[in-house]
Amino acid sequence: MASDAPEFFGIPLKYISLVILTIQNSTLVLVMRYSRIVSTERYYTSTAVLLSELTKFFVCLYISSKESVKENGGRLSVSRVYADIMGGDSWKMLIPAALYTIQNNLQFVAVSLLDAATFQVSYQLKILTTALCSVILLGTVLNVNRWVSLVILTLGIILVQLPSSPADGAADTSTSPLMGLVVVFVACVLSGLAGVYFEKVLKGSRKSVWTRNVQLSLFSMIPALFGVFVVDGAGVRQNGFLYGYTGWTYLAIACQALGGLVVAVVVKYADNILKGFATSISIILSCLASVWFFDFHITLPFMAGTAMVIYATYMYGTATSSSAIPKHSPLPTSESGRPRDVQDDTGNPSTSIRMNDLGSDNDESKHNVKVI
């Protein structure tokens, strides 16, 4: 089986994708943060989210169409592609699409209120919220090691939030730690709810990963357009859709779209130990880069909290799969708590992948991962 693993210039694809994902995870947070402070004219986050969803929609539609051509004997059937995307239970994607769109907007808001390093560490709180949603809504049973890792994760994030010296706090007027933490918490709760709902609805789905992501990107544009024309409507009408955009804004959008596609490969080919390692390295790189680019001051509580979050992330992701058995027989789960591929009636794996915002791969629903 190992010999069948795809390679690129002799290097296993899983390692290449993990390196790219690690760089993307670190870069995205830094670029998002810089894009929000580089100009006094801040762009409207709703427009950035809409462009991100449009990018992912067209990329996923292209790949999904190529899959359809291959399955249809080399001929593209537009009606078949349309039926795959809009038929069946596609309407059920409206709820997770709305939740993910709100979550994406909150990420931009949170990175505007928190420094990049604090945001990167704090956003790992989604591991806790997703686990709790899975336990409450799906009846998932977590073993002792995973509960301990969640406690360590929570304590680590609390340590990270401790203020530094008064002088440092007064020096940085571009951040609002308390409000930023509230926004991160809400975004993480939405992430957990959406992931668990996705898992519950899509059990045994025969749709391909790319078809499911076309549906989610398409339906995500509905609340995204609502944000553009209603939430930020007055500003967009007065100043224009691309108000406040710089090259860094486009780079942030591109990084987010790229991250979603890379995670698709990582989820398919890499194991949870390697993915947890990539997440940990990206946290470290973000912290170090924040010191260099944003004059971030690393304190002892921050270092201790970051170490705890990294350890908890690794510990949670490497827990044995036999310890997380849902009571109501949801999808068989991987070691990270995500459902494994489920075979349909033809014996083929049926997988729908949600790419976690900002590239994190510790969500509970591996079977259902949306490109965001």
Image: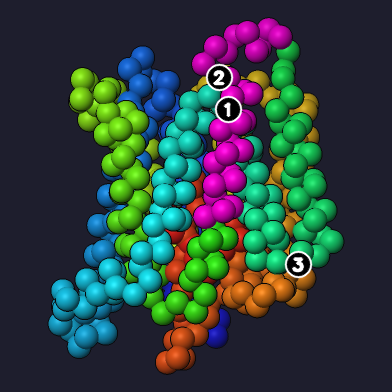
Dominant secondary-structure state across the stretch colored magenta? helix
Dividing the picture into quarters, in which one does residue 325 lie?
Answer: bottom right
Residue 52 screen position, x and y as percent: 33, 45
Q: Which residue is mark 1?
A: 180
Q: Which residue is mark 2?
A: 175
Residue type indicated by callout 1: Gly
Mark 2 or mark 1: which comes first in sequence?
2
Residue 36 screen position, x and y as percent: 41, 25
Q: Nearer the viewer, mark 2 or mark 1?
A: 1
Mark 3 or mark 1: which comes first in sequence?
3
Q: 198 or 324, which is in the foreground? A: 198
Q: Is residue 132 part of the magenta span, yes or no?
A: no
The 10 Å Cα crowd at callout 3, few under 14, some 14 to 19, many 20 or more, is some
Q: In the rendered view of the protein, which quadrant contains the N terminus? A: bottom right
Q: Nearer the viewer, mark 2 or mark 3?
A: 3
Q: In this rendering, would 83 be left or right of 101? A: left
Q: In this rendering, would 280 be left or right of 154? A: left
SS type, badge 3: loop
Q: Which residue is mark 3?
A: 141
Q: Tell me: residue 310, above or below residue 243.
A: below
Circles 2 and 3, Cβ within 8 Å, touching? The answer is: no
Q: Residue at x 72, y 20 (%)?
A: 163
Dividing the picture into quarters, in which one does residue 75 lie?
Answer: bottom left
Q: Tell me: residue 360, above or below residue 9.
A: above
Q: Residue at x 36, y 14 (%)?
A: 40
Circles 2 and 1, Cβ within 8 Å, touching? The answer is: yes
The 10 Å Cα crowd at callout 2, few under 14, some 14 to 19, many 20 or more, is some
Q: Which residues are magenta?
A: 166-194
Residue type indicated by callout 2: Thr
Q: Residue at x 34, y 36 (%)?
A: 227
Residue type indicated by callout 3: Val
